[in-house]
Amino acid sequence: MPDWELLLTDARIATMRAGAADYGVIEDGAIAISNGKIAWIGPKSGLPDNAAASNRSLDGRWVTPALIDCHTHLIFAGDRSGEFEERLRGASYEDITRAGGGIMSTVRATRDASADALYAAALPRVQALAAEGVGTIEIKSGYGLNIESELKMLSVARQLGEATDVTIRTTLLAAHTVPPEYRHNADGYIDLICNELLPEVVAGNLADAMDAYCESIAFSQEQVARLFERAAALNLPVKLHADQLSDGGGAALAARFDALSADHLEYTSAAGVNAMAEAGAVAVLLPGAFLTLGETQLPPINTLREKNVPIAIASDCNPGTSPICSLRSAMMLATRLFRLTPEECLAGSTRVAARALGLDDRGTLEAGKRADIAIWNISHPRELAYWIGTPQLTTLMLADPL
Ligand code: DI6
Ligand code: FE
């Protein structure tokens, strides 16, 4: 006879199972939990008669997988609201970056900040995401751009993971922009990452993946390829900020290196989408950056759909291009700006987001998956991509971190 720790009953469950229609709904469902995993899930009528467990009725509430924010830059110091005003007056993101502002202004503030100060600034951002149902968050470095400060950012990210129930996945984004020390020697900076930083990060288990920014204002395809070769040699998965401001062939480059995901993709060509489809890479769409930059070029949504490239949605929380510390808001923006359906948005912030992080133990509610569960006060799961800033989370239940 099954001996479960907890049995949730009277639940309306959006399982988000792959291939299931209509959110994979189970009406009048039950979920049994043991050892932090889903031991049984299905309609209550299918429960074994002799099941023993402490039973908690959810009174007909909706249940979904805990949300997953698979692309954030939420560790940073300072803010860039002044640049936001400049952009409102007509300056472009590239103009500001070339004039020494943009990412570099956050880099200066982040280098100057202590690890404790960065931690204190980032913790409320993690808590804000958790308060809207997010149980797994990816955090990138990329505002240090030297060995000491990149290591500092990644250590703070690991600390956030230890201090909260939220799973934090860390990504080394040292190749975010060329630091001033290497202004005329971007290749030298790539060498520094390949030969010194990356081995130290891997030895200290500080990153779960590596990312880079492939763009005319950042790094070339050849430079990113060098980084990716080194990451592959060290068994570190890769992902890429690709084709955000221009078509730099980023999507195809990511695909060539079997990247987990290619992110942004506003300017990605059909050939880039084809390459992603063949490689099985996830497209991570970031409507917050699209909105904040006043972008008008839409990512190739229909081509992604036609080629069955899985689409994830993330907040891209950062002080420059997406001052939005809310995955729920990003989901709503993705419906309006990108015309994704609410179901695509929920899949994109659960099942597909898990895949973008290389995590196969979460993102759906199925037997064997982690018991990372969000319980909502809503009348239908489509509401999760409808309201902005509306508190609808009843409980976020998270399994103990691994
Ligand atoms: N693209 C983005 O949208 C963020 N990074 C990137 O490569 C912006 C980061 C910033 O402007 O601070
Ligand atoms: Fe980003």
Image: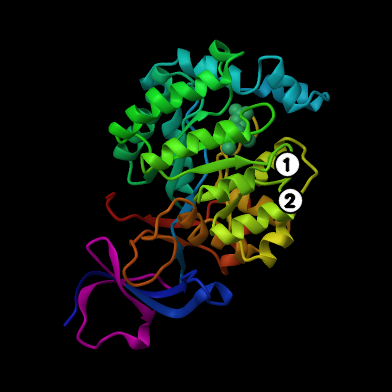
In the figure, 67 relative to 316: above or below? below
Q: Say which quarter of the image contains residue 246.
A: top right
Does the magenta-highlighted stretch encompass residue 176?
no
Q: Residues within 10 Å of mark 1 (few under 14, many from 20)?
A: some
* Residue at (72% x, 46% y) in the render: 266
* Residue at (63% x, 47% y) in the render: 251
* Residue at (34% x, 87% y) in the render: 46
| Relative depth, front residue between 9 and 65 | 65
With 346 as the anchor, is 126 left or right in this view? left
Q: Amino acid at mark 2?
A: Ser
Mark 1 or 2, nearer chain start? 1
| Relative depth, front residue between 254 and 265 | 254
Q: Residues within 10 Å of mark 2 (few under 14, many from 20)?
A: many
Cα separation, mark 1 vs mark 2, equals 7 Å
Magenta residues, as a range? 32-59
In the figure, 396 relative to 112: above or below? below
Q: Amino acid at mark 1?
A: Asp
**Colour setup of the view:** rainbow
| Relative depth, front residue between 223 and 82 | 223
Q: Which residue is mark 1?
A: 247
With 12 as the anchor, is 217 left or right in this view? right
Q: Are marks 1 and 2 in contact (CB under 8 Å)?
A: yes
Helix, strand or loop at label 1? It is loop
Q: Which mark is residue 269?
A: 2
